[in-house]
Structures are given as C-alpha cells and as structure tokens.
Image (tube, rainbow, N blue to C red):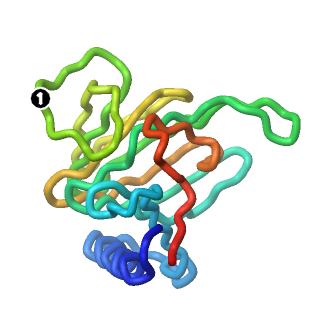
Amino acid sequence: MISKETYNEAVKKTLEAFDAAKIVLTEEERNNVEIADFGLNNLEYIGLQLIIYVNTERVCAKEMVLFPGQTCPEHRHPDGVENGIPYVGKQETFRCRAGEVELFVEGERNVGEIELPPTDVTVFHRIVLKAGEQYTLYPNTLHWFRAGKEGAIVSEFSTKSRDDTDIFTDKRIERAPQVG
C-alpha cells in the first residue's frame, strides 16, 4: 500500500514532468493522474505514473512518466475472453517523448551484466528508446522497462487496455494501486 503522502508527492512530480516537457493536459487529466506502485511500496524503484486519454473497445492512448531509474515490472498482455467474446491481447507502441527508456523484451540476450530491478525479470533483449523513437510490442510479448538517469515520458498507443488482466512475472505484483 502506498501512503497518501507518497502518492501526493508522486502526482506533483508527475505533473511537473509533463509541464517541463510542455505536454498540455486538461484540468480533468491533471486531476486523474494514476500512481501505480504495483503493491510493492517501493515507488522510487518500481512504479509508473500515467494518465489515460482514451480507452475504448478499439483503441487506447496513455501518457506515462517514469522517474529516474524507475522500472515498470515484467509482464505480458494475454489473450482472453470478455463478456463471452474472445479477444487478442493488447498490442502497444511505446514512443519516447522525453528522456530515455530501456525496454526489455523476449529475444536473444544482447546485454552483459546489468543492474537488476528489485522484482523478478526473465527477458534481457534490450531496446533503448530516446526522445522521438518508438517500438511496437505485439500481444503476449513478455516485457519490462525502466527510465534512464533523467527519467522518461512515454506515450503508449494500443488496442484496448485491460490492465487487470496483465500477467506479471513477479507474483507479488498487485496492479491496482491501494492508497492509505
């Protein structure tokens, strides 16, 4: 569980990051920043701050802030069934807007020793995205990502997001934030 004080400070830092990057948000968006600590109460190292612009049956668009060195834990977006109708897992494109983000995906390991995050990870094919660069992940692709030393802002364009169905490698992960 994340403390209310930590949550409020993270919202403040997130809005400052958007402002510094000149990403204009509506007042409603500014009031709906989501802070995800993934139930590990270690937001400095494991977490994600985001706003959702749109999430419909066909498309989703999000803006994500990662603080310096912060990691979004390893997970995948599986196929499933919703209201009796099968669907294919989420396909998403990450576009780095500011800073630098390391994206780790399935594939041949292309890094030597690296500093591991304080959560379980199993894939080590690294793709580095700098501002203006993007990468598309296909459904069911195991992945994790973390910000560089300056932090990062990443836009996500995807098919429908069903965050509650994500499968995390680290079984301690709780996707829905709890603030107390």
Q: Name above or below for residue 56 compared with residue 134.
A: below
At 63% from the left and 49% from the top, the residue drawn is: 164
Q: Residue furthest right?
A: 84
At 26% from the left and 32% from the top, the residue drawn is: 127
Residue linked to disc 1: 113
Question: Where residue 173 sits: x, y (%)?
Answer: 48, 48
In the figure, is residue 84 to the left or right of 16? right
At 79% from the left and 30% from the top, the residue drawn is: 86
Q: Name above or below for residue 69 compared with residue 75.
A: below
In the figure, is residue 113 to the left or right of 18? left
Question: Where residue 119 sits: x, y (%)?
Answer: 33, 43
Depth check: give the residue in front, 42 or 91.
Answer: 42
- Res 61 → quadrant: bottom right
| Residue type marked 1 | Glu
At 33% from the left and 26% from the top, the residue drawn is: 123
Q: Residue furthest top?
A: 108
